[in-house]
Image (tube, rainbow, N blue to C red):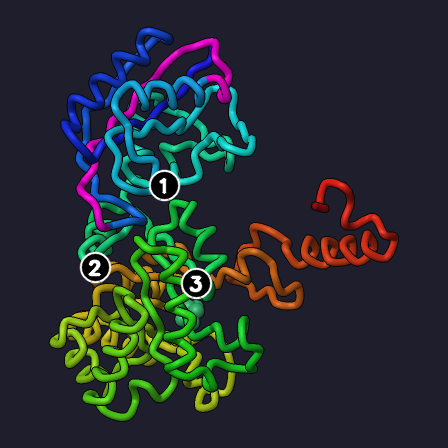
Amino acid sequence: MLQYILVLGSNLGEKEKNLKNAISFLSEKLTIISTTKPLKTPPLLNKNQPDFLNQGILIETKLNPAELLKLTKEVEKKTGRKINQRYGPREIDIDIAWFSDGKYKDDTLQVPHVFNRSRDWVKQFISELKPNALDAETNILYDDMNMKTITKIQDFTAKKQKGEKITVLTCYDYSMAKLLSKTSIDTVLVGDSLAGVFQGHKNTLPVTLDEMIYHAKTVRRGLPDAFITVDMPFLSFQISPEKTVKNAGRIMKEAQCDAVKLEGAGYLIETIKKLTDASIPVMGHLGLTPQSVLKTGGYKLQAKEKKEQENLIKDALAIEKAGCFAMVLEMIPADLAKEVSKKLKIPTIGIGAGAGADGQVLVINDLLGIDADFSPKFVRRYANLSEQIITSVENFCLDVRKKEFPGKKESF
Ligand code: KIV
């Protein structure tokens, strides 16, 4: 016997009745072990439609995934599904979220469902119905994934209060954003580090406001529901508080992001205040501030001396008071980051700042090992994509030269 978790949803007609009817039709052909309570959820992707009522069910059957899919389609029809628009409104929708045999994939079905990891309520359904269920795609327990990703600034502090670490990655383009939309990452940053990893500049100074907005727009398309923070680039916030509000306003309006980040404190405290007064959420950034590299002379560990550490603590408190909702701490001693994190109510997001920060951020290219020549001490590589990319390209070239690509399968 196989076990499956099905996720049912309805946002047209009598939603509760539709769920009940679908479960009843399913029970004629398979065993229902347990069900969650129906839960109201907002529509994702296509937002112009009524809220959904969703319900998870754990079932047992001899049917394989393809046979079960066929049955769910029949049950959808019997329950009264009329419209077949993908991500559109529907009387009933039945997804196969998880199954006890691990993974399944054919042209029409993929189990586990690709959005399990990024939908908080699906993870909650799975954990409730099958504690210790493993996500066969990543080999990670659903229980170990975040059950509540970040959607608003208040969620940052709420996570800190609950002692939940915040996960942040940079993202610069649509394809990567689309991949991240299938993970449980809390939030993403369109960092001005894109000047280096995407544009090939030797530091972050050359990237322009227009370019940041361009990248942020592409990220938003791949992550329509994520909380996205965008870096204010060099000289877009240093000139005057008024100009900064205008520039930040452009980022917010044109890229439809949720917050901006800017480096530094001191004279910028007034600017941060102006932004937050204008209801623009701001993430701070202390420690190594790469836009100051020409002044500081390199990318080195910051705040090693007592006086510098005291100043950094003062700056962090001033940034919090000015209204920032979170703060990046880059390349500072771990003990200092721990102390700052203890003193602040808002969360700190560390990069090269040890384990005491309230969250961690990495440049996604570094985590994936896209540049084999760049591996600073604070990065943990989870993949070596540079090797895979180079090998894939060489194999493509080889196949074309040997006239083995395209083959019959790839031709019309
Ligand atoms: O630009 C960036 O990517 C950043 C992170 C490294 C924090 O500021």
The amino acid type found where label 3 is placed reads Thr
Label 1 CA crowd tier, 10 Å (few <14, some 14–19, many 20+): few
Instruction: Tell me where residue 56 appears, x and y as whole percent.
Output: 29, 25
Instruction: Specify start and end residues of the magenta stretch as a single range.
Output: 48-67
The amino acid type found where label 1 is placed reads Arg
Residue that numbered label 2 is attached to:
153
User: How far apart, in angstroms, are the residues tagged by discs 1 and 3?
Assistant: 29 Å
Nearest to the eye among marks 2 and 1: give it. Answer: 1
| Residue at (50, 87) in percent of width and height | 297
User: How far apart, in angstroms, are the residues tagged by discs 3 and 2?
Assistant: 18 Å
Q: Earlier in the sequence, mark 1 or mark 3?
A: 1
Q: Earlier in the sequence, mark 2 or mark 1?
A: 1
Query: 229 or 178, which is in the foreground?
Result: 178
Q: Left or right of 109: which side holds 356?
A: left
Element marked by disc 2:
helix
Whether the residue under disc 2 has CB within 8 Å of ligand 1: no
Q: Left or right of 378: which side holds 28?
A: left
Element marked by disc 3:
strand
Residue that numbered label 3 is attached to:
170
Query: 133 or 266, which is in the foreground?
Result: 133
Whether the residue under disc 3 has CB within 8 Å of ligand 1: yes
Residue that numbered label 1 is attached to:
86
Query: 140 or 172, which is in the foreground?
Result: 172
State which image quarter holds ligand 1: bottom left
| Residue at (42, 15) in percent of width and height | 3
